[in-house]
Image (cartoon, grey):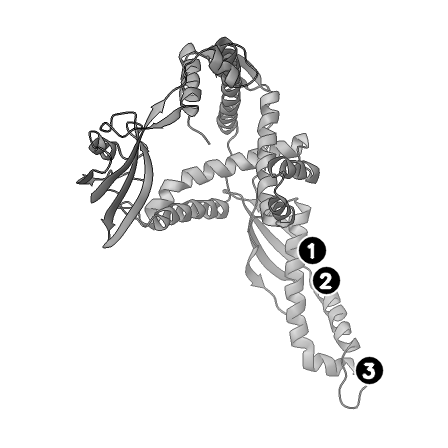
Amino acid sequence: MQLECEYKDNCQVEFKVVVPEKMIQERYKKELNAIIAKTSLPGFRMGKVPRDVVETRFGKKVKQETIQKLINESCTEGIKQHDLQPVTRPSITDIQYEDEKDLLFSVSIEIKPSIEFEDYRNIPLIKKILEVKDDAVESQLQYLQEEYAVLIDIDDRPIMKGDVAIVDFDYLLNGVRQSKENDLMEIGKDTALPEFEEKLIGLRIGEKTTFTLTLPENFINPQMAGTDITFNVEIKGLKEKQLPAIDDEFAKDMGDYETIEDIKDAIRENLGKENDKAAQEALKNKIIGALLERCDFQLPKSLVDQETAFFCDEFVSYFQQHGTDMPKGMDKETLHQKFQPKAEKKLKLLLLLEHIALKENITVSDEEYKKWIFANFRGKPEKIREYLIDEEKKDAKMHEMLIDKILNFLIDVADIKVEVVSQVEEESGD
């Protein structure tokens, strides 16, 4: 068998295959003998039918099956000989065969790109850790103060900013009356619409009001976004928030602290750990950017199209789930152009990470997966069982863990300089 292999652009490989006539005849005889061994006809026991009789009845079909088997085996042999990693099924063309002549045909196949990349160690990076400022500590302290606030019933004055109002309200949406009872709204915290809360200032318990608001285009409920809604509201109760004093007694109530300075020190330490963790995560994005800059290669068109289609479907599905129309001009072709660069970037990254994992023997074991399950779902036997037996969930999570492990490895072998900064610029994620 002759196999001539030619590498084309976009990860395409073509074979020109020649199967000698002698090989075809030998394989045909073998296949025919197998048919003879299990054939019985009137007047002949199984395996005793004359060859010429079997060949007359089944020869044409056996020859066709022999040719097809030789084609399939040639494809497999070509892939094996050249150590290829196909991403599509082989496409067979230009089949030429006549009795007592060689079999000729062509094979076209898309393969994974061959990546030659060693420059992934000692990548220079700057780890920017956000400085823990006094105002951040004070902000956390105020948050704790709010958490330990006490609500006191008020009945002798109107609603003021900072109060917690208890309200019943209803509104009409698409002809259906919607209502809510005993809803708690902290006035001025924008837990509801700011305009809604402002309408309540000055009202007293038992008072009712009706007003119409134009809801913003980015309102959480897409069905209501951008529409005029008329609300009927009744004030059912009013509470005033009393904040505890920030002093040493407050510190003692919080746990193993003696003074308010002890709490501040603990807050400062926790914020420092959070900032360091955020800086470490930011390094992963920088590593990703550096990898994509340092190594470029072609991608199989079929994989790019498949990944682009996934992003397009995800985009369309988002609008369908929220019951809203797609942006104008977003037809199939426009969406494909919009998401193809993102698909290419993702595929290149995954292939690069796979290449590094193979070179560095980075894997995620079943034991590591089980350890993650029990660490995250302790005390939840149903969840534990679900993640132990669901192969799809297992594959997805182990893939996620592997990517994280590879990125952590790359950070460990990078050339990192640490800077403490007063603010961190937002960086685009990959």
Q: Residues within 10 Å of mark 3 (few under 14, many from 20)?
A: some
- Check the image and report above or below for 242 versus 28: above
Which residue does the numbered mark 3 point to in the structure image? 48
Q: Residue furthest bottom?
A: 43
Query: Rounded to the nearest whole Å, what is the CA distance between mark 3 and mark 2?
Result: 26 Å
Residue to which mark 2 is pinned: 23
The answer to whether the residues at label 3 and label 1 have Cβ atoms under 8 Å apart is no
Residue at disc 1, secondary structure: loop
Tell whether label 1 touches label 2 (CB within 8 Å): yes
- Camera-side residue of 326 and 135: 135
Residue 132 image point, x, y percent: 46, 13
In the displayed structure, does residue 253 sit left or right of residue 328? right
**Against 20, is 56 above or below?**
below
Q: Which amino acid type is shown beneath numbered disc 3?
A: Lys
Please give the name of the residue rendered at 30% of the width and 27% of the height, measured from the top-left corner: 163
Q: Looking at the picture, which amino acid does disc 1 mark?
A: Met
Query: Of the residues under marks 2 and 1, which one precedes in the sequence?
Result: 1
Up-down: is 208 above or below 147? below
